[in-house]
Image (cartoon, helix red, strand yellow):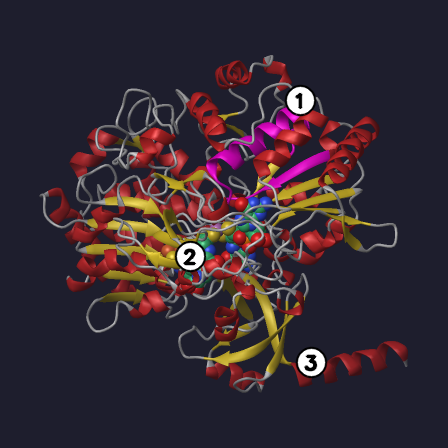
């Protein structure tokens, strides 16, 4: 029997970063046949548990669709295999030619929150020093940017959970706002058992999601607002807290600023008014506020406390920063953040969603979560990079603006994509695809021919999670080691190697190494003194297995609980920021009768590049299904399983009707995991949050009709036009 090697690592997918053991035969790179298996590993976050995606992750390592050589588009428009040397040479020549003609910012980079810390850090440096462009942003703009902006505003720092996940276990009350964790991080649900047992799990979601169902049988409450009205709901909850004197006065006085302004603004958000906007009964608003306050009081007395957690459901809106701020204000009024038994947090999404936003692939940031406009930050990073400060460009464009600049006069002519499938996952996807088509040069690094890669001029085959070394930072701000368990296919290369080679061809100053630990050590130095300080860490420390929560400055032992003594603003206080609705979700609906919410299914991950290639996952969820209420369907003459068309101001998508009483009658829901005509992002628009740049993914006015009726309508329209 072949020797089996076990490797301790973490899942390739979401931010829970479940610990797993990968077992593989001792293999040569040309021996692709040995079975690789995955098992859950004991760890405080997942406690041995994995979800279906994690269990089946190894099936993609030796998948027949795997890219094993660079692809180059020929004059005939066909992608063909080419030699590494030739494609890298061609990329560097074309980049230089494009920049000579159109300026440095004509070349841009789009990164991803799935990249390891080493890759995210090197990509930011590659953009600024090798490509010499300001234009780099990433898909975390679509994911964590509203929560990050709200967290920075309130606390002076943004770490998803500022406490270890196990802290939740003892809570008696947990308010989950717009998170469907039961589907999006199933092993996380273990940490809600205490709150369920106390009847204190509160889920706010326009759908009776798998997570909302966890509140059934006396385990808690499900509030089911109209999509896009959470800000009003949160103001209503805060109104009750303040008018009934349930706030934590001592905490507010000693640890916060801004109470008076916020309290004044709450006067007009009485529950009956909020009921009219959200559809959530005033009695339920009062009862929920009191339940939260009971948990908060108990926590303050050293008993089981209360937590408020947000997910994409309330964050991915054109007012996502304000809505998340309202959630934080509620937490601050109740005295939850920075205490031992209570807290506030956001559930980070992608595998390295946290680390991915700390090391400089965001348009306005340098490593260590530093501002690119801050002279001291620039000077520090320039000294680590050993370049003059003016070699570092200024801030670039946030993701939606960056994508809007593709092919525009004076805009972006060349784009590098690392770890995102924007043709499927970006808002207003048909416009994005038009932009991609109009580029002079599109270079996509991926291990599969994603819908974005298939449009590229050059596709670079890279390594998968179990084939390379690196670190990721999970949803608790804990840095974890990913370790290689199998050899990569011959022909694929690591992204660090690709950047090293291109940097050399482009005559970049400073170090670009293919060795992950070298880049990690540099990242640690670059982050020293920043908010996300990793300077006390290296692979040896991480391999010793000590829990490593940032900030982890040199000489420290890390920071599992961030705010126990002080918040990160210079004064040490947390700040309550007054917010009120600018957008009326109900008014937005006219003349389109329904609101489309988009999100996720348990079985698929993001744009689906990976999970649509796992047979059992695809079989479980083969294509786009639109959830709609039976009463709504009846009005529209739509029956279960019927082919339907969804139309918005931005486009139309096709799906199959999935009738369910789990959704509000005014709301429909579509997952965004599918490409082609079933792509949810054909319907979403380009509106963004003014503070964070987050697109409006969760509330789009739409019409829904049966495909047969729609076809008849189109035919009638044609007759009118051409008669
Ligand atoms: N299976 C799976 N798991 C994943 C991922 C995946 O693609 N698939 N992706 C990972 C990533 S990157 C992320 S960011 C996380 C996301 O994790 P979640 O935030 O849990 O995921 P979503 O499904 O986007 O949204 C959660 C819920 O928000 C609800 N919602 C929609 N609109 C509104 C609204 O206006 N108000 C409220 N209160 N709720 C609303 C939806 O009905 C949905 O149930 O998941 C991570 N885990
Ligand atoms: N309508 C709607 N749209 C959404 C959302 C929503 O809720 N509704 N959610 C948004 C959110 S939260 C997110 S995070 C985005 C995610 O959307 P995307 O950015 O498209 O995320 P993925 O599908 O994970 O894309 C990752 C791609 O990179 C590849 N890949 C994986 N790992 C690596 C790597 O290490 N290196 C390289 N080079 N490639 C790699 C994968 O094969 C895949 O093709 O979608 C956003 N879009
Ligand atoms: S919950 Fe997330 S990290 Fe855990 S196995 Fe599933 S996808 Fe992987
Ligand atoms: Mo995400």
Image quadrant containing the N terminus: bottom left
Q: Earlier in the sequence, mark 2 or mark 1?
A: 2
Nearer-the-camera pick, 273 or 614 = 614
Residue highlighted by disc 3 = 710
Query: Could you say which disc has been placed on residue 508 in the image?
Result: 1
Percent x, y for residue 454?
71, 55
Q: Nearer the viewer, mark 2 or mark 1?
A: 2
Position of residue 114 measured from the top left corner of the image (x, y, whole percent): 50, 46
**Depth-wise, is mark 2 or mark 3 nearer the camera?**
2
Left or right: 464 with respect to 217? right
Q: Residue at x 20, y 60 (%)?
A: 193
Give the magenta range.
Answer: 107-135
Q: How many marks?
A: 3
Which tag, 2 or 3, sits closer to the chain's start? 2
As drawn, 407 above or below 511: below
* Circle 3 SS class: helix
| Label placed on residue 2 | 2
Is any part of residue 299 visible from this angle?
yes
């Amino acid at each position: 029997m072949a020797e089996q090697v076990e490797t301790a690592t973490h899942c390739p997918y979401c931010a829970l970063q479940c610990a797993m053991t990968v077992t593989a035969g001792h293999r040569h790179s040309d021996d692709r046949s040995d079975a690789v298996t995955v098992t859950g590993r004991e760890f405080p976050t997942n406690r041995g548990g994995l979800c279906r995606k994690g269990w089946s992750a190894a099936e993609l390592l030796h998948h027949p669709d795997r890219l094993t050589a660079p692809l180059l588009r020929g004059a005939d428009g066909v992608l063909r295999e080419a030699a590494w040397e030739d494609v890298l040479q061609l990329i560097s020549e074309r980049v230089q030619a494009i920049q000579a003609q159109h300026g440095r910012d004509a070349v841009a980079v789009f990164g991803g929150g799935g990249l390891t810390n080493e890759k995210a850090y090197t990509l930011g440096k590659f953009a600024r020093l090798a490509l010499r462009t300001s234009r780099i942003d990433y898909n975390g703009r679509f994911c964590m940017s509203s929560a990050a902006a709200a967290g920075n505003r309130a606390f002076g720092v943004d770490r998803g959970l500022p406490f270890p996940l196990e802290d939740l276990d003892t809570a008696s009350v947990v308010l989950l706002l717009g998170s469907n964790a039961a589907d999006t991080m199933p092993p996380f649900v273990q940490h809600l058992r205490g709150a369920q047992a106390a009847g204190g799990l509160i889920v706010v979601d326009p759908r009776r999601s798998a997570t909302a169902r966890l509140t059934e049988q006396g385990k808690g409450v499900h509030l089911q607002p109209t999509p896009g009205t959470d800000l009003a709901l949160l103001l209503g909850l805060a109104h009750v807290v303040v008018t009934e004197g349930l706030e934590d006065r001592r905490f507010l006085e000693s640890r916060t600023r801004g109470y008076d302004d916020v309290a004044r603004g709450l006067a007009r958000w009485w529950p009956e008014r909020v009921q009219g906007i959200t559809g959530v009964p005033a009695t339920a608003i009062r009862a929920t506020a009191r339940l939260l306050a009971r948990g908060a009081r108990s926590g303050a007395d050293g008993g089981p406390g209360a937590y408020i957690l947000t997910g994409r459901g309330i964050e991915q809106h054109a007012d996502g920063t304000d809505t998340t701020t309202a959630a934080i204000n509620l937490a601050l009024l109740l005295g939850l953040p920075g205490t031992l038994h209570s807290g506030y947090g956001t559930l980070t999404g992608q595998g390295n969603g946290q680390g991915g936003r700390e090391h400089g692939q965001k348009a306005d940031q340098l490593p260590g979560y530093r501002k690119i406009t801050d002279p001291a930050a620039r000077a520090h990073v320039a000294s680590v990079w050993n370049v003059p400060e003016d070699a570092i460009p200024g801030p670039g464009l946030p993701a939606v603006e960056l994508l809007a600049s593709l092919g525009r006069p004076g805009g972006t002519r060349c784009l590098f994509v690392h770890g995102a499938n924007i043709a499927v996952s970006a808002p207003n996807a048909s416009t994005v695809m038009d932009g991609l088509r109009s580029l002079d040069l599109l270079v996509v690094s991926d291990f599969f021919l994603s819908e974005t890669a298939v449009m590229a001029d050059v596709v670079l085959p890279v390594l998968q999670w179990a084939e390379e070394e690196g670190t990721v930072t999970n949803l608790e701000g804990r840095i974890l080691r990913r370790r290689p368990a199998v050899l990569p296919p011959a022909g694929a290369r690591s992204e660090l190697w690709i950047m090293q080679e291109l940097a050399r061809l482009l005559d970049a100053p400073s170090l670009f190494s293919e060795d992950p630990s070298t880049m990690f050590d540099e990242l640690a130095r670059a982050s020293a003194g920043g908010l996300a300080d990793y300077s006390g860490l290296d692979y040896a420390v991480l391999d010793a297995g000590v829990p490593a929560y940032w900030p982890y400055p040199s000489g420290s032992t890390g920071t599992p609980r961030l705010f126990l003594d002080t918040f990160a603003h210079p004064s040490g206080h947390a700040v309550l920021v007054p917010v009120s609705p600018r957008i009326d979700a109900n008014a937005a609906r006219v003349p389109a009768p329904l609101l489309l919410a988009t999100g996720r299914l348990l079985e698929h991950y993001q744009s689906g590049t990976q999970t649509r290639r796992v047979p059992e996952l695809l079989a479980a969820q083969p294509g786009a299904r639109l959830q709609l209420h039976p009463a709504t369907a009846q009005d529209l003459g739509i029956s279960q399983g019927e082919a339907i068309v969804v139309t918005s101001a931005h486009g139309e998508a096709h799906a199959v009707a999935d009738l369910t009483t789990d959704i509000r009658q005014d709301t429909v829901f579509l997952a965004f995991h599918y490409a082609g005509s079933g792509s949810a992002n054909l319907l979403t628009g380009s509106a963004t949050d003014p503070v964070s740049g987050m697109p409006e993914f969760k509330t789009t006015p739409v019409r829904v009709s049966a495909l047969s009726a729609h076809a008849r309508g189109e035919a009638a329209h044609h007759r009118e036009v051409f008669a």
